[in-house]
Amino acid sequence: MYHFSAKISFAFLFLLLCQSHFGFAQSDSLLLSNGNMIVGEMKSMKQGVATIETDYSDSDFKIDWEKVKTVRTETEFLITVESGERYNGSLQSRENDEVYILSAKDTLGSVKKDHIVFLNEVKTDFLSNISVTLAVGYNFTKADNLSQFSVRSTVGYRAKRWALNASYNDIRSNQDETESVKRLDAALGYQYYLKRNWFTLTEVSWLSNTEQNINLRTLGKLGIGKYITQTNSAYWAVHAGASYNNESFTGDNLDKDKNSAEAFLATELNLYDIGDLSLLTRAVVYPSLTESGRWRVDYNLDVKYDLPLDFFVNFGINLNYDNKPVKTASETDYVFQTTFGWDF
């Protein structure tokens, strides 16, 4: 009888521990508009897509945010809403599509569910808050041994009040009895978020291309911007400021180095609620402050198609225009890229 009671007690304790673990691991819940409930650990909601991990699936569920009816979490998130306000807290749905944002001791605010535009699980380790994309492309043609290689990559880190972003894009083309064609552009930028969707920005970028005889252009920018709109389906931002341009050139009979001051005016549009497609376009105009009549334009367009397992195909256009290039150089340089990549 003693052994039987001990076995019952051990089994009860085991089940209790399992239940406790299950309750801890699956602390967040999403009620969908079709009545289904998903319980697990919610990781994020970005660009209108919520990601939640469950014990009963080998891979995370990705769910359109508009199909979520109510949300309750114990997980703490970095939260951004349409008005530009930012919080650290958990979520609890109430009546009339209202969601309360809660801290351990207080209610921080309330917002309509569809007005939440960004959620990211708050973690203490630095690496968990980093986002990375890497895409590569390669072409080879037997005729004249033409080979082309390209790489596009980004790295980002987003905190409650600031974000750090870096990019590196490189294209190289080689062909028998022809000079190599090279183009490299890279950037490192910092944004600090203010109230009412305003932000400050600091950026350093680098450009090298053979079409415009640019050995290296280093551009430092300082400015202020605003998100005109920021929703679950798109954002549109504008920003302006001043920049310092340091250029070195390749070629005979050219001034090898040149410095100038410029103003800049930019607009950026990101659409990400068009099925598996997303579109990012950006245009920046640089009127010179020290060279009379000179102005430049940088334009980018990226169309991304999402594939399973976080893979994607990207089509990109980069264009640089200078109405007063150095001698023998072209006013315009542009490149079309098709690459295959991975988000991780």
Image: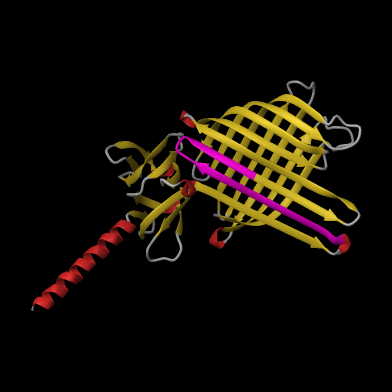
- Figure label count: 0
Q: In the image, what residue occupies the spot 44% across and 50% down?
A: 44
Image quadrant where one finds the N terminus: bottom left
| Residue 341 against residue 262 in the figure, above or below | below
Front position in the image: 91 or 23? 23
- Highlighted range, magenta: 145-167
Quadrant hosting residue 102 = top left
Q: Is-magenta flag for residue 149?
A: yes
Q: Can residue 47 be seen in this view?
A: no
Main SS, magenta region, reads strand
| Residue 231 against residue 149 in the figure, above or below | above
Q: Is-magenta flag for residue 83?
A: no
Q: In the image, what residue occupies the spot 70% across and 55% down?
A: 338
Most distant residue in the left direction: 1
Q: Can residue 196 be seen in this view?
A: yes
Q: Residue 225: percent from the left, percent from the top?
A: 57, 30
Position of 338 compared to 71: left or right?
A: right
Front position in the image: 146 or 284? 146
Q: Residue 203: percent from the left, percent from the top?
A: 62, 33
Position of 59 compared to 209: left or right?
A: left
Q: In the image, what residue occupies the spot 85% across and 29% down?
A: 255
Front position in the image: 265 or 193? 193
Image quadrant where one finds the C terminus: bottom right
| Residue 58 against residue 116 in the figure, above or below | below
Q: Residue 116: percent from the left, percent from the top?
A: 43, 42
Q: In the image, what residue occupies the spot 43% across and 34% down?
A: 85
